[in-house]
Image (spheres, grey):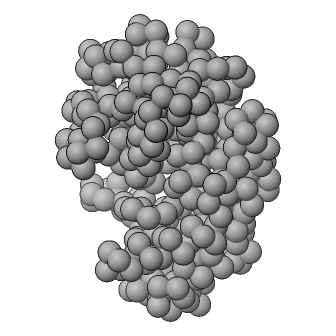
């Protein structure tokens, strides 16, 4: 590894916020594979990463002094950390996703960091309508059913308007793969308990993104920003390159895991009403956690939302390194190894 691969990427040191998370850790490991010296920012120590030579900076994204120190002396910053979810108060999302991102941008500028790669989401353009093969010319959403999407719009705009540090935003959709702590384990748990129903007609197509492909796209973006810089100020959709039927894909996973297929369904309008009712009850009672259904989730489960990767192919040279079929088999093997 070492020098030759350092030169191929164009940078030698990197900071990854949220480096102990699902996406962050995948980015860290690919960077290490190229001989890049890595430090991470997180809320905890990550001894597994430290054993690989990674330095851990423990602190709060909302603390500008801390972020300034963490960014000092690195070539590239990958801002992956975010508060994700479909429910929760605006203040929590603002503090982490908006203020935290503003601090990252400020710290990059003050430290003369060469490049900033921001992990965004397609939710920034999801305006409650089907999206069939949309591209980056889509406008930002104007109405929001969850604080997460609203906060990511504000944060992405701030990153892309940064003129001091070459910056870009990546929008991977429905990230999955081995070590996934959220999406697939929750689906499997709901499937085993017979709690999952098909929402809508079951024909909606969606993009999915295998974890190794997402991490690969991050490295390609950084490589561009430290060289030609044609990606500066740009946003990019990242996926497997072709959509899947959401419910067929879930049922294929269930079959491979020995879980019964989803046979029951609920109309989109009924799911939306259930979500609205649960949201109201949670607000009135102050109940913690996420409702099992929300209006945003109903729309995500019933409507198509897939995008063109042509811009990422053209500017970044992005192509999926792992196919959906291969990724699914790797993921099933991992899930079974973990006792799922």
Instruction: Please count the marks in the image.
Output: 0
Residue 216 in sight in this render:
yes
Q: Nearer the viewer, residue 251 or 335?
A: 335
Q: Nearer the viewer, residue 139 or 108?
A: 108
Q: Nearer the viewer, residue 231 or 100?
A: 231
Residue at (67%, 57%) from the top-left corner?
Answer: 240
Q: Quadrant of residue 205?
A: bottom right
Q: Is residue 115 left or right of residue 52?
A: right
- Quadrant of the snapshot with the C terminus: bottom left
Residue 296 at x, y percent in the picture: 55, 57
Residue 300 at x, y percent in the picture: 60, 61
Residue 117 in sight in this render:
no
Residue 140 at x, y percent in the picture: 67, 36
Q: Is residue 54 left or right of residue 124?
A: left
Q: Is residue 171 left or right of residue 152?
A: right
Residue at (63%, 55%) from the top-left corner?
Answer: 321
Residue 36's place in the image compared with 290, above or below, is above
Residue 144 at x, y percent in the picture: 57, 44
Residue 19's place in the image compared with 264, above or below, is above
Residue at (61%, 23%) from the top-left corner?
Answer: 225
Q: Quadrant of residue 220?
A: top right
Residue at (47%, 76%) from the top-left corner?
Answer: 332
């Amino acid at each position: 590894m070492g020098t030759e691969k350092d030169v191929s990427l164009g940078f030698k040191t990197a900071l990854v916020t949220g480096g102990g998370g699902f996406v962050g850790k995948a980015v860290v490991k690919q960077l290490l594979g190229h001989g890049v010296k890595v430090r991470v920012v997180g809320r905890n120590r990550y001894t597994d990463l430290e054993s690989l030579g990674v330095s851990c900076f423990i602190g709060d994204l909302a603390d500008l002094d801390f972020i300034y120190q963490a960014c000092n002396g690195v070539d590239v910053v990958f801002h992956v950390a975010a508060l994700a979810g479909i429910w929760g108060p605006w203040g929590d999302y603002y503090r982490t996703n908006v203020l935290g991102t503003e601090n990252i941008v400020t710290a990059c500028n003050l430290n003369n960091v060469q490049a900033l790669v921001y992990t965004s989401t397609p939710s920034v353009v999801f305006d409650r309508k089907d999206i069939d093969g949309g591209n980056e010319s889509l406008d930002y959403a104007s109405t929001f059913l969850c604080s997460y999407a609203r906060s990511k719009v504000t944060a992405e705009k701030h990153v892309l308007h940064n003129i001091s540090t070459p910056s870009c935003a990546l929008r991977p959709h429905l990230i999955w793969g081995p070590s996934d702590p959220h999406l697939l384990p929750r689906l499997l748990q709901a499937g085993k308990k017979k709690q999952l129903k098909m929402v809508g007609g079951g024909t909606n197509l969606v993009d999915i993104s295998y974890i190794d492909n997402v991490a690969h796209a991050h490295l390609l973006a950084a490589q561009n920003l430290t060289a030609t810089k044609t990606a500066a100020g740009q946003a990019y959709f990242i996926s497997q390159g072709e959509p899947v039927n959401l419910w067929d894909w879930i049922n294929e996973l269930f079959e491979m895991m020995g879980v019964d297929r989803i046979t029951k369904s609920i109309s989109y309008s009924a799911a939306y009403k259930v979500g609205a009712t649960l949201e109201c009850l949670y607000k009135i009672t102050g109940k913690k956690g996420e409702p099992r259904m929300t209006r945003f989730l109903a729309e995500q489960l019933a409507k198509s939302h897939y995008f063109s990767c042509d811009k990422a192919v053209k500017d970044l040279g992005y192509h999926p390194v792992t196919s959906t079929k291969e990724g699914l088999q790797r993921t099933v093997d991992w899930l079974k190894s973990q006792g799922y």
